[in-house]
Image (spheres, helix red, strand yellow):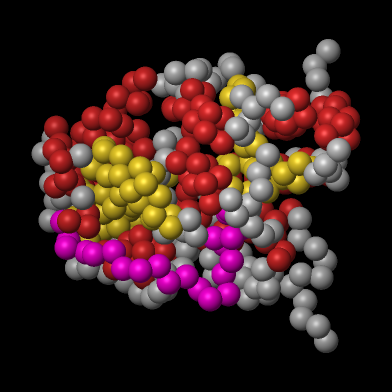
Amino acid sequence: MKTSADQLASTLRDLCAAAGRRIQLMEVCGTHTVSVFRHGLRSLLPEEMRLVSGPGCPVCVTAQRHIDAAIELAGRPGVILATYGDMMRVPGRSGSLEQLRAGGADVRVVNSARVALDLARANPARTVVFLGVGFETTAPATAATVLEADRDRIDNFTVLMCHKLVVPAMQALLAAGDVPLDGFLAPGHVSVIIGAAAYRPIVELYRRPVVIAGFEPVQIMLGLVALVRQVVEGRPAVENVYRGVVTDAGNRVAQRLLARVFVVADTPWRELGRIPDSGLELAPAFRRFDALERFGVRLGEDQAHPLCRCGEVITGKVEPVECPAFGMECTPLNPIGPCMVSSEGTCSAWFKYHRPAAVGRRPG
């Protein structure tokens, strides 16, 4: 007989009761956040356990300076800016890519870096800027596309590099100590690439358990049970409940691809600031594909909307309903921050699945 989410919830309640204190866990990935809400898993969680969101939504963690750079590049003559759809409505200092397109800029929504390269082939007189956003899940596809552009000598293709690495952000959260965390629910798709062993520094340096899980309800509940059991027993480890997909070593082919095309570098994150060795830049042999260098664009300072608390949401400091703009000035139709824009955004998930009745109504 298969284990159900309800059965696992009962085990979770027993474990939390045995802990004798409140346990706070972080789901690193936005896909986990949305899946928890979509399947009503929060209703199964015991009161002694709190699940907070982490910096695993690629759109949400992209620094404001990179959003502003994308908007500046999209406004340049002769440029086609190609981006994933979630980035279109993220507000910058001078509007959004969606608003810029409405004003006449050539901004295209694509579903892969390869489609952006095809745009460059079809428009040799113009330069395509691909907005390279995402973690280790999407970065190999960008790397493969750069290699193809290099092989075929397609020089009107460039990338605005915003790719980030998951584990350094987890370490930065623990090093800051702003949010007490007992453990991490790690994303299945990123772990397919980097492997379970990549999370060992979290256990070795910070004595926090990490459990890798998929995105179905039973997988998530299995992950939470494994995390709480480790906390109760005081034996932090990297545990993988997604063994049919994730290996200890990860995808070696993808890892070699990343190492060939990119170099690890310091990069800015929303709220977390500049984290050492947490981003990817083009290696010297491929720097000619760097959009910032090609167009001489310099990154400015981050200037987020004064009402937006997205950065605090994605670091587990506050829940969306603690933001005074949530459901008022900030809604899916009128977002002031990326957490309300992205399909993996915590604010978007709360608004859709977990919005208190009072939110969105001004006192009369």
Tell which of 142 and 109 is nearer to you: 142
> On the picture, is 233 further left or further right than 60?
right
| Left or right: 163 in relation to 234 | left
The residue segment tinted magenta is 294-315
Q: Which residue is drawn at 83% across and 34% down?
A: 19
Mark count: 0
Tell me the chief SS of the magenta region: loop
Furthest residue toward bottom: 364
Instruction: Give 264 or 119, whichever is nearer the viewer.
Output: 264
Q: In which quarter of the image is residue 6?
A: top right
Q: Can residue 159 be seen in this view?
A: yes
Along the line of sight, the residue nearer the viewer: 118 or 176: 176
Q: In which quarter of the image is residue 257?
A: top left
The answer to whether residue 298 is magenta is yes
Percent across and percent down for residue 173 are: 54, 48
**Which residue is located at x 33 percent, y 48 percent?**
266
- Residue 189 in percent (x, y) is at 52, 31
Q: In this view, does 31 lie above or below 295?
A: above
Say if the magenta span includes residue 255. no
- Picture quarter with the N terminus: top right
Let me know if residue 105 appears in the view.
Answer: no
Classify 329 as above or below 238: below
Q: Left of 186 or right of it: where is 85?
A: left
Residue at left offset 26%, top offset 37% = 262
Q: In which quarter of the image is the C terminus?
A: bottom right
Name the foreground residue: 272 vs 160. Answer: 272
Considering only vertical position in the picture, is 153 above or below 156? above
Q: Percent position (x, y) of residue 31?
A: 59, 42
The residue positioned 19% from the left and 68% from the top of the image is 77
Position of residue 235 measured from the top left corner of the image (x, y, whole percent): 68, 24
